Image (tube, rainbow, N blue to C red):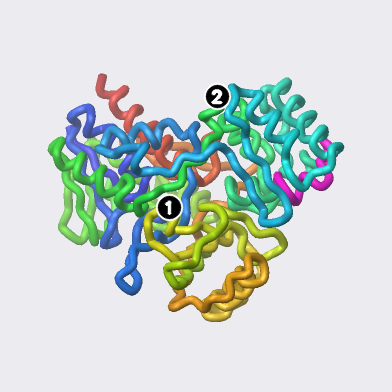
Amino acid sequence: MNLAVIGGGYAGLAAATTLAAQHIPVTVFESAQQLGGRARGVWHKQTQLDNGQHILLGCYRHTLQLIAQTGGNIQADFLRLPLQLTLHNIFELKAARLPAPLHLLLGILTAQGLSFGARLQAIRFMQAMRRSRFQLAQDMTALALLKEHKQGELVRLLWEPLCISALNTPLAQASAQVLLNVMRDSLNGSRADSDMLLPRVNLSALFPDRAAAYIKRHGGSVFTSCVVEALIPQADAIEVVSARGTYRFSHVICAAAPAAAARLLRPIPQFSILAEQIATLPQQPIYTVYLQYPQTVRLPHPMLGLHDCVSQWLFDKGQLAGQHGLIAAVISAQGIHQDLTHEQLAHKVTREIHMQLGIAAIPLWHQVIAEKRATFSCESDLVRPTYLTPLANVLLAGDYTAGDYPATLEGAVISGIRCAKRITGDLS
């Protein structure tokens, strides 16, 4: 019994690691030179960057467990902060160091930048969601839900930044139910569930590189720069045609990005409908603008939001990873920034930082990383493909597959674990 995992992102490596822990031989095929997919480290001017900024929450237990299982140290690998949403000079909410739900209640009551009426409306909204167990009878857009509950000024100050960050989808399109799923797990559990964990190490080192070493230690193989060209179903197996040759496996977990998964599945008659469903999933971009300032430049917080700017969130990599003077500006979802050249966008972000924070220093260099199809667009009533396929020995993993979560690391990891457990269940 041997298995193939196509795709070395967080979903594929979660599946492979889970299988390796059960002493099941697994081979990972990754087309890129390095592992991690859309959450990996990259190099520029001898500086380690990431192709995006990812925040984990305390409730992301599956991801944190796998990081620890493969050799990570959660305390050392992350800066752990109580929930804190800060829009510079506009709004700030800090969860109190109290047991849940008092931590959030006091945080809302003492939030800066909100009227007293808005604070009461936020509390009423959370109480209403708790009574409904964060479950809607019918999905709707997040904006419609917030208007229904009279959230007023909270929409632009609290819920819109939260929705964009969590779902990478504008409020007017975003699924209210998926947003509530995230709120249910992060804001309605223990106080630690709402904690923000900001990586101190690059995203490849955080899990993918460790997972690869773990898989190899447990008898598996990891091939990078190895494109899978075709899948050929056989009577009792699947042939994987790759740049390294053709291999025969009992099971295949396809954990490639949606476009690559659709390309692989489309030629197989049984997968034509599924391939079309995957190919037509709406997509959203994420842009990350890196600015290397002189080393003395520092933000007021490790993570800081800007209001009414193209830049949405700023990360101080000096405070996080010892990369002093390096600022990462993240711009999630579609917007006017897509019409700018990378040079124009970097200059615009630099001007915003100057105007908002008074940082007049000129960056020594900049680098824009544009993931134009970073995530699926997590829209209301979106039908996402399940992990099961028309062939019992071919499974589908990825943050875009059906599940409670949007396109997050936790969603990807859960999908990979689900596929692995399906296979181990079939074998038991």
Say whether residue 155 is magenta: yes
Residue type at mark 2 is: Ser
Question: Residue, x 38% and y 49% (percent of image)?
Answer: 200
- Percent from the top left, x then y, of residue 367? 45, 73
Question: Residue, x 44% and y 65% (percent of image)?
Answer: 326
Mark positioned earlier in the residue sequence (2 or 1) = 2
Frontmost residue, 295 versus 427 = 295
> Which disc is residue 190 wearing?
2
Side of 351 where 391 appears, left or right: left
Q: Which residue is mark 1?
A: 320
Frontmost residue, 45 versus 14 = 45
Q: Quadrant of the C terminus?
A: top left
- Percent from the top left, x then y, of residue 72? 29, 39
- Percent from the top left, x then y, of residue 327? 49, 64
Q: Quadrant of residue 270?
A: top left
Taken as a whole, is the magenta stretch helix, strand or loop? Answer: helix
Relative vertical location of residue 209 with respect to residue 106 in this rendering, above or below = below
Is residue 379 visible to us here?
Answer: no
Question: Residue, x 26% and y 43% (percent of image)?
Answer: 211
> Magenta residues?
147-159
Toward the front, the furthest residue is 296
Q: Secondary structure at mark 1?
A: helix
Q: Secondary structure at mark 2?
A: loop
Is residue 241 visible to us here?
Answer: yes
Question: Residue, x 51% and y 29% (percent of image)?
Answer: 192
Residue type at mark 1 is: Leu
